[in-house]
Image (cartoon, grey):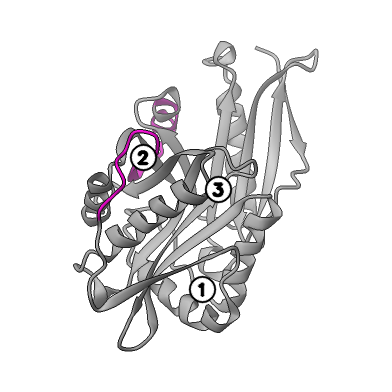
Amino acid sequence: MTFRLTALADPANGAHTHRLAWLASDPGGTPLGSAFLRLFSSAEQSHLAELSLDVHPAERRRGVGTALLTAVREAARADGRRVLLAPATEGSPGDAFLTSHGFTRALVLEFTRLDLAEAPLPEAPVHPDYRLISWTGSCPSERLADFTHSRTAMDDMPMGDTDFGLLVWDEARVLAAAKAVADRGELLLTVAAVETATDRIVGFTELVLPADRTGDAQHYGTGILPAHRHRGLARAIKAETVRWTRAEHPGITGLLADTADNNTAMIAANHALGYRPTHRSVEFRLDL
């Protein structure tokens, strides 16, 4: 099969990443497939790149995907990357493609959804030593240092063999993440658990609502500091997120979450609240 690859400028760059793009097309210019290479720029992830590759179903098994992968792999190596990650739905053609090209399974994620129309209002009382607070958008300035520290709760989040690196969160990064959501027109909701005795944030969960405030919203980070785990706080803050969304954003019909399949505590909390599995995704790894 005759086709050509074109490297494209990709404006979808973030504060800590930038992307390269390729388009595969036939001699007449009809698109056949595309690939994006996300290059992480923070010091702790400078070894890492992430691939997103898609070929039209009618054009598969003709070498398009292999050609795109070759271009991406060469670009990642030229940029000094040593690990290439790529996600694929378990059992999908992408799963088979990556496996056949030498990628290995590094992490499996369980994807779940809570149907807000059908699920009963969750019951998850807050432990008596804690209370809940919440905010919309960027963290209030008086809580910023406290909230930034609480993000270390995710330092031991299961990441399998991805070699994802340890993200170091400072106040600037916390604000930049919230700004990125706002710049897309989306809405960030945060619920946090505060220890009453110290008035310190010890856990949090984040939910991002789509720009039109309809359809499904996506959970982002959820974490509880190690000294405060096993007290039902993860379930309590997620239950409050459900109540808040139903009360103030009736256009949202479902909440989406993804969790490492060996993070049994968080999976149990999600299931107890009514989240149901939709599919599993595999994070593949290729050492460059």
Seen at 78% across and 43% down, the residue is 9
> Magenta span has 3?
no
Q: Which of the 4 image quarters holds residue 136? A: bottom right
Is 110 placed left or right of 221 in the picture?
Answer: left
- Vertical position of residue 104 compared to residue 57: above or below: below
Residue 178 at what x, y percent from top left? Answer: 60, 63
Residue type at numbered disc 3: Leu
Secondary structure beneath dot 1 equals loop
Residue bearing mark 1: 169
Q: Is residue 182 left or right of residue 125?
A: right
Q: Which residue is mark 2?
A: 114
Q: Amino acid at mark 1?
A: Trp
Which residues lie in the magenta part? 96-123
- The total number of labels drawn is 3
Q: Quick one: quadrant of the N terminus?
A: top right
Give the Cα distance between marks 1 and 2: 29 Å
Q: Residue at x 52, y 15 (%)?
A: 61
Residue at image coords 49%, 73%: 168
Check if residue 120 falls in the magenta segment: yes
